[in-house]
Amino acid sequence: MLLEGGLGLHACSFSVYCAIFIFIWSLFLWETYINFRQLKVAKKVTESPEEVRRFMNDVEFDKSRRYAIDKMNFAIISGFYNILSLSAILHFQLIAWVWHKSQEHVLFIFSHVPGSFNVTERNEILFSLLFTVYVALFQFLESLPWSYYRHFVIEERYGFNKQTIGFFAKDRLKSLAVGLVIGLPIVSMLVWIINAGGHYFYIYAYGFTFVVSFIIMFVYPEFIAPIFDHYECFPDCELRKKIEELAVSIEFPLKKLYVVEGSKRSSHSNAYFYGFGKNKRIVLFDTLIKGFKMPGANVDEKSDETQNRGCGDDEEILATLAHELGHWKLKHVTFNLIIAQINIFLMFFAFGQLVNVDHLFVDFGFPPSTAPTLIRLIVVFQFVFMPYSSVLEFLLTMISRKFEFQADAFAVGLKSGEKLKSALLVLTKDNLSFPIYDWLYSMCTHSHPPVMERLAAIDAKMAKKD
């Protein structure tokens, strides 16, 4: 059972409930406001500025502008739907309704299964598991048309979508299945730990999530990611040799180098690394390398347009990797991991103080002392902590922008400044990234600084170095 005690607060649930409503709508209006600011910029700037023309011609600039407008309109409309959906869930107490249906269905199923163990209303873990399945199915179905429109209308319109409808459907179903396979055991263990952990359950709950998060970090790239995408060892070539030399020069413990067939789903490009200790891997998207063909791939699988995208110069790819490895060398990854763990612990600690404040859960459809553990966790983590999470997200966005500048400077220190600039221009052009931004929109939403700011910072760093 839930621990007794907590803060013993008796705040009026009505005020908390209203505060949640006010905050989610205020956040929606703020996000819509800054989206409209950026939309206004994209509609107003119809001719490419002089500094943009060196890497985008007028046709490419106009295409990136229209792409930005379409994405912004999509964000505004989908955001409006999401706030209406969330408001309906809260107003009609649908969380409680789904929970009670989960109870009914579990009791019905086990009452009709011969030889099954006795299930009563006290079997909270079983109810929590079915509740999680129902919520996952709802989110899957609710997001499906939006995801379809984004891929097969917007991305398709600008030549990025490479998925077939069959691939899209299988990908979504696999995501749902993998999420449930991983999520259901985690939910059951968390409910058990919180109920059985006594006054210090939050310490045990945090310890469990700490272990799980690191297990997933190890397991995901090796066993889960290949379920969704095709990975191959990077072929022996001059570029591979240069990448290995780059890793050695900065003491990056590279063990394996992979290429992923990102072109099967999108023309967008990327590169990243993962791993712990002395067991690091680098992954390059095939779309990052101009003209690259996956081993065994059909030559006709890619369009000429896709084949012509990406960096055609090995040094540009090396500069891109120098930037990514700069995050490792400068301890950015370690910093983010520490912040994430501190945040999780603080949230569990705060939950420990609020878990028995029954008045928090009344307007969610649960009379005093009836809210189950999973519901208490959802209400506190997703709704009560929403202001805190929003502020933290903004601060982490600002820190991320700073880290991007530092990683660029690291690449400059490796004498890759000019090639990094040209790589950024290639990626901006290939991804149709609209280069003109409203300052407030950029500050609030961009974890990566706009390309023009990055180019200016790289130039300043190179001038200072000289």
Image (cartoon, helix red, strand yellow):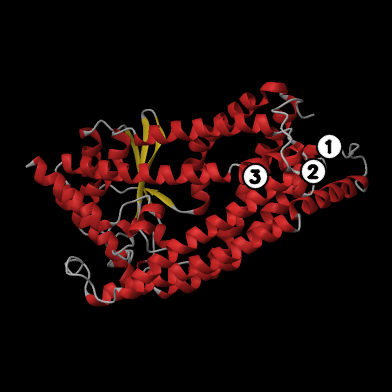
Q: Looking at the image, which residue is at 77% across and 25% down?
A: 4
Quadrant assignment for the C terminus: top left
One can see residue 4 in this view: yes
Residue that mark 2 sits on: 127
Q: Is residue 224 left or right of residue 410?
A: right
Disc on the earlier residue, 2 or 3? 2
Residue that mark 3 sits on: 181
Tell me how far mark 2 sits from mark 3, CA to CA.
16 Å
Residue 25's image quarter? bottom right
How many dots with numbers?
A: 3
Question: Which amino acid, mark 3?
Answer: Val
Q: Nearer the viewer, residue 147 or 458?
A: 458
Q: Is residue 381 left or right of residue 3?
A: left
Disc on the earlier residue, 1 or 3? 1
- Closest to the camera, between mark 2 and mark 3, is 2
Percent position (x, y) of residue 141?
A: 65, 62
Residue that mark 1 sits on: 123
